[in-house]
Image (tube, rainbow, N blue to C red):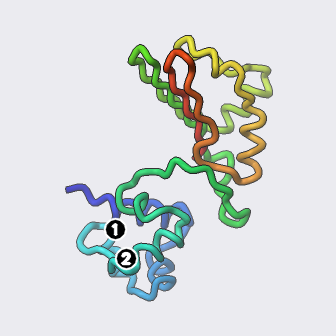
Amino acid sequence: MENMLGKNIAKYRNQKGLTQDQLAEHFGVTAQAVSKWETGNSCPDVLLLTTIADFFHITVDELLRGETAAETRLVPEDERKDVDKMLLKIVVDSAKGDRVRLNLPLPLVKLALELGMQMPEVNGIEALKSLDLNTILQMVDRGIIGKLVEVESAEGDIVEISVE
């Protein structure tokens, strides 16, 4: 069985730029305990899971399963990631069964906009052409992340745009 909990603790700890010692100190455990959590040799006490999830600003489900909540949230200014290290994710599931997944670094999106490029049509989905990427970038600059757009066309095509 995959150690999703341990991998997620390590992932979120690293995203915050913390060492195992620093995380351990915050939760009142030893660095060895954190190491064992991350390697899958043990798990945090069940009563600590909500505290850990709250500390990382995620749900317990995200912590345990690795599933990102489909929510949009405002990240406090002092906890925001560098925008230049974030991704614009576009997911297209067409009614015809086509699946398109794009992960675009935000610096690339910014450069494309500066050069006058517009959102391309993907698999004939017209809804993407009308999206305003400048507005999406402004939202991200203000700390809004997660699922920003979800569109279902009359033909049954589904488009989701998120920023992580």
Q: Position of residue 16 (x, y in %)?
A: 56, 65
| Image quadrant where one finds the N terminus | bottom left
Q: From this viewpoint, which residue is outermost toward the left? A: 1
Q: Give the quarter of the image for residue 121.
A: top right
Circle number at residue 135? none
Name the amino acid, label 2: Val
Instruction: Say which amino acid is labelled 1.
Output: Glu
Q: Position of residue 41 (x, y in %)?
A: 23, 72
Which percent across, then down, holds residue 90?
55, 31
Whether residue 118 is situated above or below residue 74 in the rendered picture: above
- Residue farthest bottom in this picture: 28
Q: Residue at x 49, y 20 (%)?
A: 156
- Lateral position of residue 164 relative to residue 133, left or right: left
Image side of residue 99 versus residue 139, left or right: left
Q: Which residue is mark 2?
A: 34
Q: Which residue is mark 1?
A: 38
Q: Is 160 in front, or is 152?
A: 152
Q: Residue furthest front?
A: 154
